[in-house]
Amino acid sequence: MLAMQEELEDARAGAAAIATDLASALFVMAVRARLHREGNGSGLLGLLAHRQLGRAVAATLDDPARNGTLDELATYPNASRAGRVRMFRRTAQRRPLAVLAELRLELAWRKLSGPASAVAAIAAEVGYRAESAFSRAFHRRFGVRAGAVRASAPAC
């Protein structure tokens, strides 16, 4: 924290960028410490804490448009597809594809609330081939239409 304060007080070139990166690193370290401490937690944090299952979640966040299969969710030596699904369900208390769909819809909400992009483009970015399928899933999850969220977003 002292390093961030010094960067901002000195106001040298790039100080804001360095302070932002330090804050991001500090946040990641805090989350990592919590995951390590709670180890076998449940839900999304439990998935992220799990070495192999966390990869599936991270891959979805890195490339939400990629349509992963259960076989690709996580790589376990000597674990069957059914075994991977059981591990995922035990950790997240939900089906793997339901969790990944939820992540995609949450990402879509953020994108819809940000700088202007068409609903169809955002649907494609988060892995929906058809805007209508995306709109139905979005409405089912949030109880509001994607277009309404897009329309209420600040213009940039």
Image (cartoon, rainbow, N blue to C red):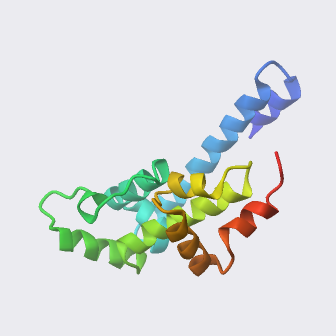
- Vertical order, 133 against 7 (above or below): below
Which of the image's four quarters has the N terminus?
Answer: top right
**What residue is shown at x 66% (from left), y 53% (from top)?**
118
Pick whichever, 73 or 109, lies toward us: 109
x, y percent for residue 105 = 55, 66
Frontmost residue, 48 versus 9: 48
- Report the residue at 74% width, 69% height from top: 148
- Residue 79, compared with residue 10, is above or below; it is below
Residue 76 vs 25, above or below: the answer is below
Name the residue rendered at 15%, 65% in the picture.
79
Does the rendering let one see residue 139?
A: yes
| Residue 38 visible (yes or no) | no
The quarter of the picture where the C terminus appears is: top right
Residue 2 as seen in the image, left or right of residue 38:
right
Query: Residue 139: which quarter of the image?
Result: bottom right
- Residue 78 position, x and y percent, is 11, 61
Q: Position of residue 16 (x, y in %)?
A: 78, 31
What residue do we see at 81% from left, 63% from top?
152
Residue most extreme to the left? 78
Q: Position of residue 5 (x, y in %)?
A: 81, 35
Using residue 12 as the reference point, say whether residue 109 is left or right of it. Answer: left
**Which image quadrant for residue 36?**
bottom left
Q: How many marks?
A: 0
User: Which residue is outermost to the top?
Assistant: 13
